Image (cartoon, helix red, strand yellow):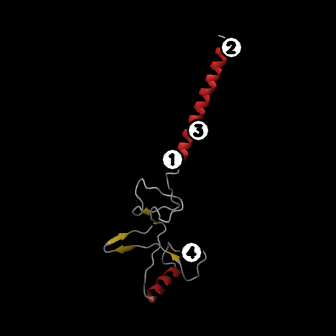
Amino acid sequence: MSRQDYDNAVATLQQDEADVTSGQAAVRAAEINLAYTRVYSPISGRTGRSSVTEGALVTASQATSLVTITQLDPMYVDLTQPTTTLVRVEARACRGADSARRRQPGARESCYWKMALRMSFRGRCSSPR
């Protein structure tokens, strides 16, 4: 093998190695770009109907949200009840009648208790946790 043939073979090898490295970089760039197509939520819950259609162009600072997520855990329920009912519920919680009660951190002494509940809506029930 002549020196010229050897030099050509080494140059071809280096060129092929550079092509492989370039191809690996292109694959990595495509993986990074693909990761930008996924949107992760900071909370878990149930999603509503999407505000945009598949294939639509979206940007990071657009005014329209992609979807609305309803957080299910914890779930807060605001019920309008007479004051007498509230007093009875508070008294029961303070007596320790409900074993699942816990005082919320930073709450006033008489308010904001977590209690295991059983709620029913028109014949359907949801069990306490």
Residue 53 sits in quarter? bottom left
The residue singled out by tag 1 in the image is 34
Kindly report which numbered mark, 3 or 4, lies closer to the viewer in this rendering: 3
The amino acid sitting under disc 3 is Ala
Quarter that holds the N terminus: top right
Q: Distance between the residues labelled 4 and 1?
A: 42 Å
The amino acid sitting under disc 2 is Arg
Q: Distance between the residues labelled 3 and 4?
A: 52 Å
Question: Which residue lies most toward the front here?
Answer: 4
Q: Are there few (<14), some (14-19), or many (20+) residues within 10 Å of tag 3?
A: few
Image location of residue 55, percent across then percent down: 42, 53
Residue at (59, 27) in percent of width and height:
16
Tag 2's secondary structure?
Answer: helix
* N-term-proximal mark, 2 vs 3: 2
Question: Does the CB distance between marks 3 and 4 fall below 8 Å?
Answer: no
Number of the label disc, if any, that sits on residue 25: 3
Question: Which residue lies most toward the right here?
Answer: 3
